[in-house]
């Protein structure tokens, strides 16, 4: 207590079972002193997954993975795969620098994906470097920038959607899709790439719907 009051906090590890007040104590210490509290989590997985106000970075696996996944107010940075699930909601978050070399959706992937008020930037995957949805994708008030779809893995030499890829319906509303790329410096001669910004394998009732949005510099 004296160390907190005098603002002379030393390095420490708070250990204990969930619900014993470790995070609360850390927040109190940060508020009382001149320290900065930065939430940080390791890989998160499960059936129903909620990641809130957290920073997950530098893992050699999907940072967040589950059946029903919600990521809110968080940063998912430089992992081997960002967010993966069946139904995925990403809200007010930053998904950046994640790389999945042998699967679609380096940033966010799922059957149904919704991205609200978020940044999806500089991620790499097969089909859909930034966002990949096997059914439907909804990108609302968000930015999908600088992502790359690169050949190899399950996609072979044919890849689509540097920014966004879907197999059903894609809605882009009040958003920016910019500077996304299909291919790489190691692209094979027989490579076939489609849709630097957005690509869709249309099913009955599917398609791409872009409303009040900007598509700029995709290739």
Image: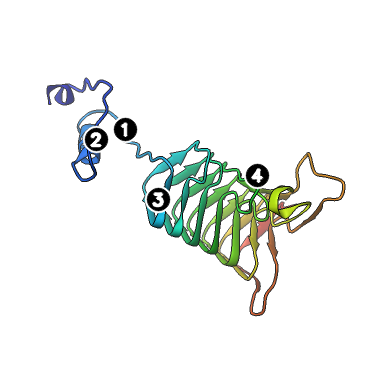
Distance of label 3 from label 4 (alpha carbons):
26 Å
**Residue of label 2:** 26
Mark 1 secondary-structure assignment: loop
Q: CA distance from mark 2 to mark 4?
A: 37 Å
Residue 14 to residue 162: above or below: above
Q: Percent position (x, y) of residue 35? A: 28, 29
| Side of 41 where 175 appears, left or right | right
Tell which residue pokes out farthest to the bottom in this image.
205
Circle nearer the N terminus (3, 2): 2
Residue farthest to the left, as pictured: 2
Marks 2 and 4, the one that precedes in the sequence = 2
Q: CA distance from mark 4 to mark 1?
A: 35 Å
Work out which quarter of the rendered image holds the N terminus and state it: top left
Q: Which residue is labeled 1 in the image? A: 36
State if disc 1 and disc 4 touch (CB < 8 Å): no
Which label's residue is closer to the chain start, 1 or 3?
A: 1
User: Mark 3 sits on what residue?
Assistant: 73
The answer to which of 173 and 85 lies nearer the viewer is 85
Q: CA distance from mark 1 to mark 2?
A: 10 Å
């Amino acid at each position: 207590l004296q160390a907190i009051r005098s603002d002379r906090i030393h390095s420490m590890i708070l250990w204990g079972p969930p619900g014993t007040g470790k995070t609360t104590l850390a927040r109190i210490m940060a508020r009382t002193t001149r320290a900065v509290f930065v939430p940080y989590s390791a890989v998160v997985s499960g059936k129903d997954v909620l990641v809130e106000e957290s920073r997950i970075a530098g893992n050699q696996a999907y940072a967040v993975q589950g059946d029903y996944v919600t990521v809110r107010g968080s940063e998912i940075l430089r992992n081997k795969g960002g967010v993966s699930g069946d139904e995925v909601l990403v809200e007010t978050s930053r998904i950046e620098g994640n790389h999945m070399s042998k699967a679609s959706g380096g940033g966010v992937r799922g059957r149904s994906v919704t991205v609200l008020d978020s940044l999806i930037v500089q991620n790499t995957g097969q089909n859909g470097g930034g966002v990949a949805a096997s059914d439907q994708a909804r990108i609302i008030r968000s930015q999908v920038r600088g992502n790359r779809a690169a050949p190899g893995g399950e996609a072979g030499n044919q890849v689509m959607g540097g920014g966004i890829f879907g197999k059903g319906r894609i809605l882009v509303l009040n958003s920016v899709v910019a500077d996304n790329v299909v291919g790489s410096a190691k692209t094979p001669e027989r490579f076939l790439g489609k849709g630097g910004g957005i690509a869709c394998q249309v099913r009955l009732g599917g398609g791409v719907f872009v409303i009040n949005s900007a598509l700029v510099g995709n290739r």
